[in-house]
Every structure is written in structure tokens, then in C-alpha cells.
Image (cartoon, rainbow, N blue to C red):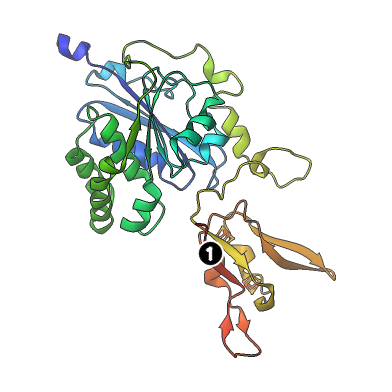
Amino acid sequence: MSDDIKKAPRYLIRFHGRGGQGAVTAAQLCAMAFNGPATCMPTFGAERMGSPVASFVKLSKDFEKVRTNEQVYSPQYVAVLDDTLLSDVDCTAGMVPGGYLVINTCRPIEEVREIISKNNPPAINIALIDATNIALEYLGRNITNTLILGALLKVAPELFTIEQLSDAIADQFNPKIAQKNMDAIKVVPDATTVYPADGDVKISYETDYKKQWSHVKPDLIGVKEWDLAGVWYVDKVDGGSKRVNTGAWGVSVAQYHPEYCIQCGNCVFVCPDFCILREEVDGKWQVVGVDEFHCKGCGNCVAVCPGKKDKETGEKHKALTMVMKC
Ligand code: SF4
Ligand code: SF4
């Protein structure tokens, strides 16, 4: 092995997303786009859409530096696909001083700094991108995984070029979807704003910042969010999904209109997140509303809702409709 390869840096990246947002695919695309040895792996809590998930990538020209089969505990780069995760998970855990935290958000930097300051991060650079709006415009849905990679391009051009990322996207998706994603990532670097860390802090790619045994200490990544992501619909358990806003990343939410409901129960069976609320009325279980805290806006319930005719106008109305959140 040449001396140049031995001196090659090791890039460590962590993605935070919610189940269904494509954080795992983002890690795979990252590994595919890098011109050299790369490994990636995901970690899941309960397999439920909307639960916090993370994925990890190691990149280096030196294969020896990426072959360890463990999570990334001290990333130089962290990409967050959904800013509501900043409150649920410590997205800055283990970050290297001078590293970059890239967040899909439309919040101002002051608000983002205030949220993450609760976790006492080191001096890190922050890059903000409103990827959701770009995704809605170019892809027609709130899937931001390729766009967050476009933002990563801006802060870490050493990882891959836009052409390498485009090639990876073309390999991963069907041609039509790939083209939409490739068009979208072109506008991302200019739409990404970087807020430098206080002081002239340079990233070290050599120092090992990993805390010993951090993977078994409660409250650090790998333990805390698994606990939080569990599905608990039992009143006595103050944890699990009762506290995790798994519907936060949806851009729309289902609304219930009781006057048009015929109590067919179709919606109950198609909701992947048990969001159709029911109560026992006169000895029968009746649909009474939508659990908006967990509804992620998939629209399944609306698709199957037959609704009924309005008595006055004769028009048919569904008892469930979708409304945009903002
Ligand atoms: S849109 Fe309907 S089916 Fe989908 S999560 Fe919300 S309530 Fe459930
Ligand atoms: S599918 Fe529509 S009509 Fe049927 S129970 Fe659900 S809300 Fe009511």
C-alpha cells in the first residue's frame, strides 16, 4: 500500500431521519458516490414509519480504515432529514469539533442553535437547507434524502462530485425518478446556507473522538432512541410512541368529518400507524377522529373512505380528507 493511501483521511457520516424518509438510501448513495472503499449500515428501532432511524457511512481511500463493522460514533458530518428530530434525538452526539451539521429545515439559525444547545455540542458548523420545499417542487413528495446529499456536497466537496452523486442516483432509481432527483440536487448547493462555527476550528480526520463504551451507556445514540421508538398504546407507559411525534414529518394530515361517516371501518384497517381513533358508543366501536400526533399523511384512509351524500346538495363527500400543514 502506498504512503499516500496510508495517509488518506477517513470520513465519518451519520444520517438521522424518520422511518420512510430514506435515511438508509441516503447512506447507500453516499457510499456509491464516493470514489473509493466505503461501508454503510443502518440502525432501526421499532420498524414503524416515522420512528427515528439513523444510518452510518465510512469512506476512505484506505480500505483498512472503513472495514470495522460498527456504527459511526464520532462523525465529522451529520445530516438530518427532518428538523423535528432535533428535539427527539441528540443529533450532535459525538460530533467532531469543526464538523458540519446539515439540517433540512425552514427554521431560522437562531432557533436551530437554541434547540441543539441543550445537548452541549462542540464548536460545529451548521448548514441549513429547506429541502422539503425543493422536494415538493421537483419530486412531488416530501422525500429529501438525495437533496440532503446535495447539501452535503456544498460543505464537503471532498466526498464526491455532483456527477458522481448523479451516477449513484441513476444506479439506484428508475430513470424517471432518477432524473427528477438529479434535477433537484442541482439547485441544492445554492439554496444551502452555511453558518460557520465560532473560532477557526478545523476538522481532524485522524483523531479518534469515539468515547469508550459509549454504545452501552444509556441516553447516548443507540439506546435512547430505541426506547423512544417503541410502539406503546398503553396509558401506564409514559414512553414509546406516546412521546415521539412520528407524524411530524408529514406535510399533510387527515381530517375527520363525522357528518359524512357511515362507520364502515375501512379506514381503521388501512392506517399503518393506528391513527384512526375509535370509541365504544352504545356497545359498538365507532370511528371518532384522527390521531394527528401520529398521522403522517399517507392518505390511505382517504383513498378507501366511501363517505356519503350531503342531504341538501346531493353531492358525495368523504368523511376523511387531507389538509396541508403549512
Ligand atoms: S393519512 Fe390516514 S391512513 Fe395515513 S397515517 Fe394519517 S390517518 Fe393513517
Ligand atoms: S372509511 Fe370513512 S366512512 Fe368509513 S369509517 Fe372511516 S371515516 Fe367513516
Give above or below for 67 relative to 149: above
Task: Give whichever of 298, 195 is nearer the camera.
Answer: 195
Left or right: 252 with respect to 199?
right
Q: In x, y percent, where is residue 180? A: 26, 55
Give above or below for 264 relative to 1: below
Q: Amino acid at mark 1?
A: Val
Q: In x, y percent, where is residue 133? A: 38, 52
Q: Residue at x 22, y 21 (%)?
A: 61
Ligand 2: give its quadrant: bottom right
User: Which residue in the structure is indicated by mark 1?
Assistant: 323
Q: Quadrant of residue 205?
A: top left
Left or right: 244 with respect to 19?
right
Q: In x, y percent, where is residue 64? A: 28, 16
Give above or below for 303 relative to 164: below
Q: Residue at x 57, y 40 (%)?
A: 46
Q: Is residue 176 visible?
A: yes
Q: Is residue 43 visible?
A: no
Task: Give whichever of 320, 272 is nearer the camera.
Answer: 320
